[in-house]
């Protein structure tokens, strides 16, 4: 059993030291809760549970505390993939829900598995997901003052390997902040969240770069073809260099190998494989 999570990127400035410690503590607590849950649940259930905890923590840019777009609204995206069944589901630019990952979970059993905008919102309401305002006072203040020092930081993700040897991955984001309404991130696409029976990957960073590099499926495909998770990740991230792509990756292979890497430090992450390890 293994569980790895990320909380997006973090700016290593002295002024953010207190925030860094807060995020370290939060990731440590959440990865422990997720691992305990994994002891009695499968990979897909644990991924949903763990990403929900990350969405509920307002330190990160997903669920509560999501970035506000340039029209004053919050639109969130999330996706979920089951490595055993190879089913993928997601919501794009959904508004007014507490946990986008749980809406994605509901869609996993539906014929139409990825919904965007109004359709995603209507689906959520029709399936008893209550109206919820994910904005926090800090996000409102940032928007009102047009601050952007935490833009593109805080997307969350999880990859789980359960006792049955099955993998699952989930990713959730509030977007990059002050973006054009309608912009689609990588988080609700296979480019940023992908898993099969050999490996699972969740990405964070600049969505456009991750989509351009097809990061998650490239890594998983390379592991499927026999490459180690570390080498597959390094090769894929190196292919982003010609356009200075900004991406971070967490992953688990079916053989138990775990790996995390980023092109522009510092991605924040936590791992539990019987012992807790948190970025520092």
Image (spheres, rainbow, N blue to C red):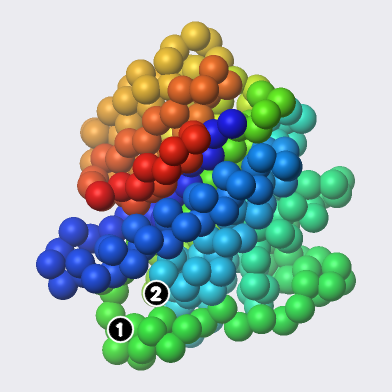
Considering only vertical position in the picture, is 23 above or below 217?
A: below
Is residue 161 rendered to the left or right of residue 89?
A: left
Residue 216 at least partly seen: no
- How crowded pointer 1 is (Cα within 10 Å; few <14, some 14-19, many 20+) is rated as few
Furthest toward the left, the residue is 14
- The circle drawn on residue 82 is none
Considering only vertical position in the picture, is 132 above or below 165?
A: below
Residue at 54% from the left image edge and 74% from the top image edge: 64
Percent position of residue 58, x then y? 47, 73
Q: Identify the image quadrant of residue 147.
A: bottom left
Is residue 54 rendered to the left or right of residue 132?
A: left
User: Pointer 1 and pointer 2: residues touching (CB < 8 Å)?
Assistant: yes
Considering only vertical position in the picture, is 84 above or below 97?
A: above
Q: Identify the image quadrant of residue 248.
A: top left
Percent position of residue 278, x then y? 35, 47
Q: Identify the image quadrant of residue 153.
A: bottom left
Percent position of residue 113, x then y? 77, 48
Sequence-earlier tag: 1 or 2: 1
Q: Nearer the viewer, residue 185 or 44?
A: 44
Percent position of residue 137, x then y? 43, 88
Considering only vertical position in the picture, is 13 above or below 246?
A: below
Residue marked by disc 1:
146
Residue at 65% from the left image edge and 63% from the top image edge: 100
Residue 6 at least partly seen: yes
Residue marked by disc 2:
178
Mark 1 lies on a secondary structure that is loop
Mark 1 → mark 2, Cα distance in angstroms: 8 Å
Q: Nearer the viewer, residue 183 or 60?
A: 60
Residue at 25% from the left image edge and 49% from the top image edge: 280
Mark 2 lies on a secondary structure that is loop
Count the marks: 2
- How crowded pointer 2 is (Cα within 10 Å; few <14, some 14-19, many 20+) is rated as some
């Amino acid at each position: 059993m293994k569980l790895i999570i990320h909380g997006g990127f973090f700016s290593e400035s002295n002024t953010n030291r207190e925030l860094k410690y807060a995020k370290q503590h939060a990731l440590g607590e959440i990865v422990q809760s997720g691992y305990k849950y994994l002891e009695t649940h499968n990979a897909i259930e644990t991924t949903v549970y763990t990403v929900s905890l990350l969405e509920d923590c307002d330190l990160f840019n997903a669920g509560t505390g999501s970035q506000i777009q340039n029209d004053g609204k919050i639109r969130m995206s999330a996706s979920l993939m089951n490595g055993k069944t190879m089913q993928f589901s997601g919501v794009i630019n959904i508004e007014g829900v507490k946990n986008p990952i749980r809406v994605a979970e509901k869609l996993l059993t539906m014929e139409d598995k990825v919904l965007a905008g109004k359709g995603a919102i209507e689906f959520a309401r029709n399936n008893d997901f209550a109206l919820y305002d994910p904005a926090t006072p800090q996000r409102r203040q940032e928007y009102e003052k047009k601050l952007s020092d935490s833009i593109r930081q805080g997307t969350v993700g999880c990859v789980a390997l359960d006792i049955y040897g099955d993998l699952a991955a989930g990713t959730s984001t509030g977007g990059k902040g002050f973006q054009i309404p309608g912009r689609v991130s990588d988080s609700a696409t296979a480019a940023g969240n992908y898993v099969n029976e050999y490996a699972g990957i969740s990405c964070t960073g600049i969505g456009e770069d991750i989509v351009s590099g097809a990061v998650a499926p490239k890594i998983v495909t390379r592991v499927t073809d026999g490459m180690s998770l570390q080498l597959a990740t390094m090769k894929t991230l190196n292919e982003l260099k010609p356009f200075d792509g900004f991406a971070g990756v967490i992953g688990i292979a079916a053989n138990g190998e775990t790996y995390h890497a980023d092109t522009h430090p510092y991605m924040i992450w936590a791992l539990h494989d019987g012992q807790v390890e948190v970025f520092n």
